[in-house]
Amino acid sequence: QVQLVESGGGLVQPGGSLRLSCVASGSILNIDAMGWSRQAPGKQRESVAGITGGSNTDYADSVKGRFTISRDNAKNTVYLQMNSLKPEDTAVYYCNARLRTARSSYYNDYWGQGTQVTVSS
């Protein structure tokens, strides 16, 4: 059984910073791409940032220059450093990973339960 568990969310003032973490656990053989998405109330989920197995990154235009995604392969962990936060960044943030387990020959996508980020004064 694979689990992705996010942490690091909370309440922060505009202009502040937060660092999200997501740890993947279980019978994992290899993790390919990892990423973060978010969903604000009344809106569709949107991709925020992604990182490949080779550590190539991409970002939504709305967060470029403010957010940084990184990963620690030894810890099966992906991070999202969020700086210069704005009220419009308020959302539930989800991590995802494309990985292969000991029980499958294929890569599948897994998602965490989400962590709330609220940017407000």
Image (cartoon, rainbow, N blue to C red):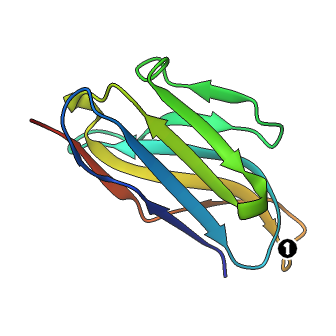
Q: Residue furthest left?
A: 121
Q: Quadrant of the N terminus?
A: bottom right
Between residue 9 and residue 108, name the one nearer to us: 9
Image check: 115 left or right of 97? left
Give the residue pinned by disc 1: 104
Image check: 1 left or right of 87? right
Between residue 40 and residue 118, name the one nearer to us: 118
Residue 104 spot, x, y in % from top left: 85, 73
Q: Is residue 99 above or below residue 51?
A: below
Q: Residue at x 60, y 64 (%)?
A: 23
Between residue 27 and residue 84, name the one nearer to us: 84
Image check: 97 left or right of 31? left
Residue 97 spot, x, y in % from top left: 66, 55
Residue 72 spot, x, y in % from top left: 71, 52
Assign a secondary structure to mark 1.
loop
Quadrant of res 35: top right
Mark 1 Cα within 10 Å, few/some/many (few <14, many 20+)?
few
Q: Residue at x 68, y 29 (%)?
A: 57
Q: Amino acid at mark 1?
A: Ser
Quadrant of res 31: bottom right
